[in-house]
Amino acid sequence: MVSQLLINKFVKDKEDTDKEKTRNGYVYLASIVGIILNLILSVIKVAVGFISGSVSVTADGFNNLSDMASSVITMIGIKLANRPADKEHPFGHGRMEYLSALIVAFMVMLVGVQFIKTSIGRILNPVPITFEIIPFVLLLLSILVKIWLSTFNKFIGNKINSSALKAAGMDALGDVFTSSCVLISFLASKFTALPIDGYVGLLVSVAILYAGFTLVKDTISPLLGEAPDENLVNAIKQGVLSYDNIIGVHDLIIHNYGVGKCMASIHAEIPSNIDIITIHDIIDNAEREISEKLNIYLVMHMDPMCIHDEKINDEKKMVEEILKKYEAVKSMHDFRITEGDDKVNLIFDIVADANIINANEKEEELKNKITEEILSINDKRNCVITVDKDFS
């Protein structure tokens, strides 16, 4: 209810989530709400921690402060990421969003390391904790706030398909767990002199470190060049195949230059007997329309295929039957033949499963095995095989 009221109040064109301006509006709203709530929670917990002498409460307060800093840097990163392309960066500045998240991740880990040291010191040198009912109630309310913040971030993350906000929702849910542990230790201090506070502080610090490590891992992955989103891959392939006279696709490569900033290239197979002007118009339309629909920059390459030649089709079927025996081979494309003086050249590409190839056999060994099997059927054949990697 509250989430919808905030969205209605502060996000324009809230249903048009494909628009960059609308998407940014959702991100700014989530960030500002996160900044305000985490700042309030941090001030409350740090104050309670200093008053009561509890290191676990203080650590939890600084954890909220790092969450607030995360929201601030996320906003700055998105602002920089939305800068237009220039001569030095022809694909824009979208990856600034990942770099800003990386900064946040290291800040979170630094907080975790610092409070591990403090918690160990508290275990070795226990300090009495002063329990009071008002700070206890404030800590309990902070947990309820974090539960709401988790659902709010998750709701917006699903609305605009933002992995960053979905992760923020999970992070807030993790904070609920750590804050609950802190609350229990704070309550336990009323009944025992054991250094429970130090042990819980250590637990909270490890949780902070883990959250930072996870964020580093998730942020570095797209910077290194992770596999593209499966839904985007399927949408591009199905979109291209929906056009007349396109009979197959292969060699799809997607480059990610930031959220909503992708460039893709794909090979489209067409019958070789189609008029070149006709198919050029089809390819042009497909590039433009799919780019607009999926918010990407798509480049298509035409591969003419002889589909009405009986001899080529017979040879292709023979090769396809052989390739079915090889688990490493995912598909074949660009099949063609050329006539030599005494032999027929079978030229084709295969898409290989990189995991199987790397683990069990090298590319050359796979090509040799396929070639040997084809020659065993007809030694008047010469195979020219190219092994492609599946980039999608």
Image (spheres, rainbow, N blue to C red):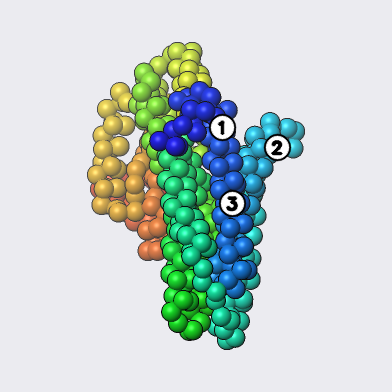
| Classed neighbour count for the residue bearing mark 3: other residues with Cα under 10 Å, few (<14), some (14–19), many (≥20) | some
Disc 3 and disc 1 in contact, CB within 8 angstroms: no
Callout 2 environment at 10 Å: few (<14), some (14 to 19), or many (20+)?
A: few
Earlier-in-chain disc, 3 versus 1: 1
Q: What residue type is labelled 3?
A: Ile
For image coordinates 51% across by 76% down, the residue present is: 197
What is the x, y in percent for residue 269?
A: 40, 28
**Horizontal and vertical percent position of residue 176:** 44, 58
Relative vertical location of residue 156 with respect to residue 365 in this rendering, above or below: above
- The amino acid type, in three-letter code, at marker 1 is Gly
Give the residue pinned by disc 3. Answer: 40
Q: Which of 98 and 106 is in front in this view?
A: 106
The answer to whether 239 appears left or right of 313 in the picture is right
Outermost residue, right direction?
87
Question: Which disc, if any, is residue 120?
Answer: none
Q: Mark 2 points at which residue?
A: 89
Q: Where is residue 127 in the image (x, y as percent from the top left)?
A: 58, 81
Residue at figure coordinates x 34%, y 47% from the top left = 330
Judge whether 288 appears above or below 161 on screen. above
Residue at 55 percent of width and 67 percent of height: 57
Sequence-wise first label, 1 or 2 = 1
Q: Is mark 1 on a helix, strand or loop?
A: helix
Instruction: Nearest to the eye among marks 3 and 1: give it.
Output: 3
State the residue position of label 1.
25
CA distance for labels 3 and 1? 23 Å
Q: Is mark 3 on a helix, strand or loop?
A: helix
* Nearest to viewer (mark 1 / mark 2): 1
Tag 2: residue type? His
Horizontal and vertical percent position of residue 97: 61, 44
| SS type, badge 2 | loop
